[in-house]
Amino acid sequence: MSSNRIATLTIDGITTEFPMVDGNIGPSVIDIRALYAKTGAFTFDPGFMSTASCKSSITYIDGDKGELLYRGYPIEQLAEHCDFMEVCYLLKKGELPNAAQKGAWVKSIKEQTMVHEQITRFMQGFRRDSHPMAVLVGLVGALSAFYHDSLDINDPEHRLLAATRLIGKMPTIVAMSYKYSMGEPQMYPRNSLDYSSNFMHMMFGTPCENYEPNPVLARALDRILILHADHEQNASTSTVRLAGSSGANPFACIAAGIACLWGPAHGGANEACLKMLEEIGDVSRVPEFIKRAKDKSDPFKLMGFGHRVYKNFDPRAKLMRVTCHEVLNELGLNNDPLFKLALELERIALEDEYFIEKKLYPNVDFYSGIVQKALGIPTQLFTGIFAMARTIGWIAQWHEMIGDPDQKIGRPRQLYTGSMRRDVPSMDQRK
């Protein structure tokens, strides 16, 4: 990782040197950890636009190429050749499992699908119309109150047990939040099913009928989970790492990530995209809304286009587009008005000079909302599905951070713009 190159910084005629550090791929970094000690100055980088907050070997994104790698493997190959459990193993352990390793891994996850029965009663404290993300934040954070044998972050066995518990229980908790909002009885896991099929059983099954998940739809859900499993140092992942840097237990850290994911600019983007398509309503109105999107004075924003990192086509969007076709074909929804509207919006945007110049390509959120709607998942639960997928990424990132000897408690600096030092006036002198 080290480099022989040196970066120099000159302030008030005094030049200071800082080492350059190279990753395996991607941009090099300037190690400025000694910046304040050497110069008495900080850097100012709101949103971390040019700051690497950690070193990581998990996920790599090349936004210019439109490339996403999990542990070096292209997302396209993983989505085609692997299931979500294999991807979870890869992200957690660094390599794809062989048959025996996969079997043992899947068994360890299935052993954790049940939740403590008192958690079902704990859920009854929420209003029935609570947003599912509010429920997830509460229930996942509360897991630490039920599972005291996996809270020691310095114990590798505790960390592994916490990881398998979170991966195994997240689908159960997400499905529980849906069933509770619908006034339907909770469906217990069926460990004879695969991960995605089991989730669909818990979501859509009822005690009075035997529910058999459609394998095409289950595979579509599995692909959604793969595509959302990790995405470098995004807002929610950075939140998990920041919470974890204080020594907080893993359940609290993941709950913090879920809270951050709730934001419409992050995990709620696919929900916002679907609402936008419903607002447009008809293919004939697409030109009108394209025009509005270009107008800086118009508050309308074209959701599902462009990305903070990708300056090319989001590779996940290509895969989600194919998945969208598969789902709609299976369900006989080829003439679905929202999907036809999305395709027309995509076509016009990709041919329009304004969007080409600004590199506003469709991202994964553009299609994932349509797919989830077709699967029968309610709009309010879209971000819950995202949380279910991203749990393994958060765990892998948290585990990596715990083992990093360079990691310190997160403590960003600031550029202070408030009042200078002043004395407190007496009450009769205050204006």
Image (cartoon, helix red, strand yellow):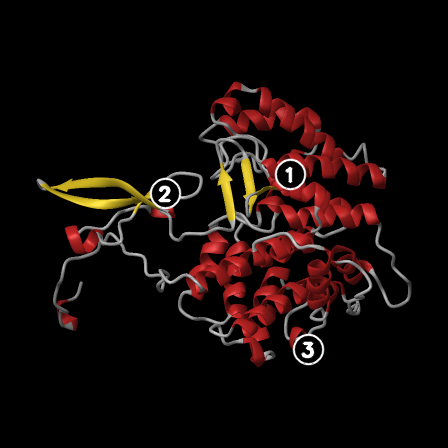
Packing grade of label 1 (10 A; few <14, some 14-19, many >=20) is some
Q: Which of marks 1 and 2 is nearer the N terminus?
A: 2
Q: Is mark 2 on a helix, strand or loop?
A: loop
Asked whether the viewer can see residue 54, the reply is yes
Identify the residue at image location x=31%, y=43%.
Answer: 3
* 207 is higher (above) or lower (below) than 374: below
Q: Is mark 3 on a helix, strand or loop?
A: loop
Identify the residue at image location x=55%, y=74%.
Answer: 158
Instruction: Say whether marks 3 and 2 touch (CB < 8 Å).
Output: no
Task: Identify which residue, 285 or 226, lies in the foreground.
Answer: 226
| Residue matched to label 3 | 116
Q: In screen coordinates, is 74 left or right of 103?
A: left
Packing grade of label 2 (10 A; few <14, some 14-19, many >=20) is some
Task: Identify which residue, 156 or 278, lies in the foreground.
Answer: 156
Identify the residue at image location x=52%, y=71%.
Answer: 156
Q: Residue 328: x and y, percent?
A: 79, 38
Q: Earlier in the sequence, mark 3 or mark 2?
A: 2
At label 2, the amino acid type is: Asp
| Marks 3/2: CA–CA distance | 46 Å
Q: Residue 274: x and y, percent?
A: 65, 42
Residue 410, image quadrant: bottom left
| Residue matched to label 2 | 22
Q: Residue 235: x and y, percent?
A: 47, 52
| Marks 1/2: CA–CA distance | 26 Å
* 109 is higher (above) or lower (below) than 120: above
Residue 251, image quadrant: bottom right
Q: Residue 378: x and y, percent?
A: 71, 52
| Residue matched to label 1 | 76
